[in-house]
Image (cartoon, grey):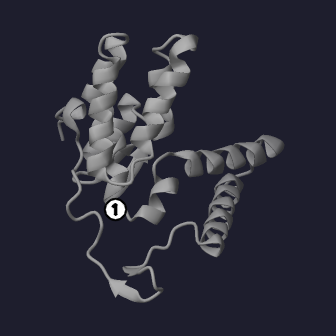
Amino acid sequence: MGYVVSDDHKGLVEAIGRYFQGVVWQRCQVHFIRNVLGMASRADRGRIMSLLKEITGAQTLESARNRLHEAAEVLESSHPRIADHLDTYGEEILAVHALPEHHRKRMRSTNMLERLNEEIKRRTRVIRIFPEASCVRLVSALAMETNEEWMERKYLEMNAVEMTGCGTPVAVPHPLENAPRFPHSHSATTIPS
């Protein structure tokens, strides 16, 4: 495994650091934005949201970093807590730029996983009491069904060949080769083995 998306839940971050050493960790952009907007007054949320959209909508890592630093500078005087948060944790939402551009939209957040979890919750709530291994069979069947849907829809094209603009396949290096590795600066806690 080379890429993990999660929110910044302390237990998840520690587990990723311990069991998925060396992976590229993407902090869920949706959760990050919610956290930042929670620090602002309702009146200022629109302006802050537009700055955050500029960061997450950037086409390149360099452009995203520039916009991140610009946003922190703009907010320094009016919202120092948000500016500090962007400076400290902003890089965590930029790991998605290690992926090919057509993967970024779906791999920048935990939305796909959260939809699967909601479907599992909805289906298991109907049954309530499960005999023996039927819960495992139900959840496994739902996971396989979801996987088939994603494969049919071509949610993510996971081959090692990229398509050029003219439709010609061209071999490309693995996109995660030069990406920053977990843990990021604030999460660099040492976990005993």
In this rendering, would 147 be left or right of 134? left
Q: Position of residue 12 (x, y in %)?
A: 39, 37
Give 157 or 10, whichever is nearer the viewer.
157
Q: Is residue 82 above or below residue 99?
A: above
Q: Residue at x 35, y 18 (%)?
A: 75
Q: x, y percentage for residue 165?
A: 44, 79
Q: Is residue 141 above or below residue 58?
A: below
Residue displayed at 23% across by 51% down: 21
Question: How many marks do you count on the picture?
Answer: 1
Q: Quadrant of the N terminus?
A: bottom left
Answer with left or right where residue 135 lies relative to residue 91.
Answer: right
Residue farthest bottom in this picture:
168
Rendered location of residue 179, percent (x, y): 23, 56
* In the rendered image, the vertical position of residue 165 relative to residue 105, given as above or below: below
Q: Which quadrant of the structure image shows residue 186?
A: top left
Left or right of residue 44, residue 6 in this image? left
The answer to whether residue 14 is seen in the rendering is no
Q: Amino acid at mark 1?
A: Met
Snapshot quadrant of residue 141: bottom right
Q: Which residue is mark 1?
A: 1
Using the rendered image of the protein, determine whether residue 107 is visible from the camera's viewpoint. Answer: yes
Q: Residue furthest right?
A: 126
Residue at 65%, 63% in the rendered image: 146
Q: Secondary structure at mark 1?
A: loop
Identify the residue shown where x is 49% and y is 31%: 50
Quadrant location, the C terminus = top left
Q: Residues within 10 Å of mark 1 (few under 14, many from 20)?
A: few
Question: Where's residue 13, x and y in %?
Answer: 33, 37
Residue closest to the eye, 99 or 181? 99
